[in-house]
């Protein structure tokens, strides 16, 4: 989507920057992390979400 925006807006001298926020704590992710604590206990995501 950002590539299309950049292509369309280039003639108007508009710069498009796409930012990916990284890990986002949502209800789905929290539920998955809690149900798989044994599998993800060493995961960096566990540190991000449960500290």
Image (spheres, rainbow, N blue to C red):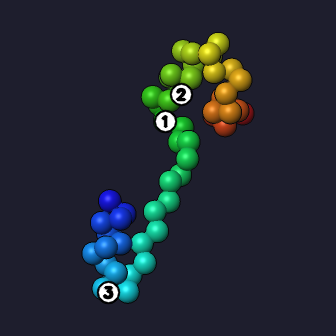
- The residue at 54%/15% (across/down) is 35
13 displayed left or right of 40? left
Residue at which label 2 appears? 30
Q: Dot 3: within a 10 Å radius of its alpha carbon, few (fewer than 14), some, or many (20 or more) residues? A: few
Residue 22 spot, x, y in % from top left: 55, 47
Residue 8 spot, x, y in % from top left: 27, 75
Q: Which mark is residue 26?
A: 1
Q: Nearer the viewer, mark 3 or mark 2?
A: 3
Q: How many marks?
A: 3
Residue 26 spot, x, y in % from top left: 49, 36
C-alpha distance separating marks 3 and 1: 37 Å
Secondary structure under the numbered disc 2 in the rendered image: helix
Q: Quarter holding the N terminus?
A: bottom left
C-alpha distance separating marks 3 and 2: 42 Å
Give 15 or 34, whichever is nearer the viewer. Answer: 15
Secondary structure under the numbered disc 3 in the rendered image: helix
Q: Which mark is residue 12?
A: 3
C-alpha distance separating marks 1 and 2: 6 Å
Secondary structure under the numbered disc 1 in the rendered image: loop
């Amino acid at each position: 989507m950002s590539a299309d925006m950049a292509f369309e807006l280039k003639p108007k001298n508009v710069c498009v920057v796409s930012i990916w926020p990284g890990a986002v704590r949502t209800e789905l992710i929290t539920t998955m992390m809690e149900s798989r604590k044994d599998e993800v206990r060493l995961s960096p995501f566990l540190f991000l979400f449960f500290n």
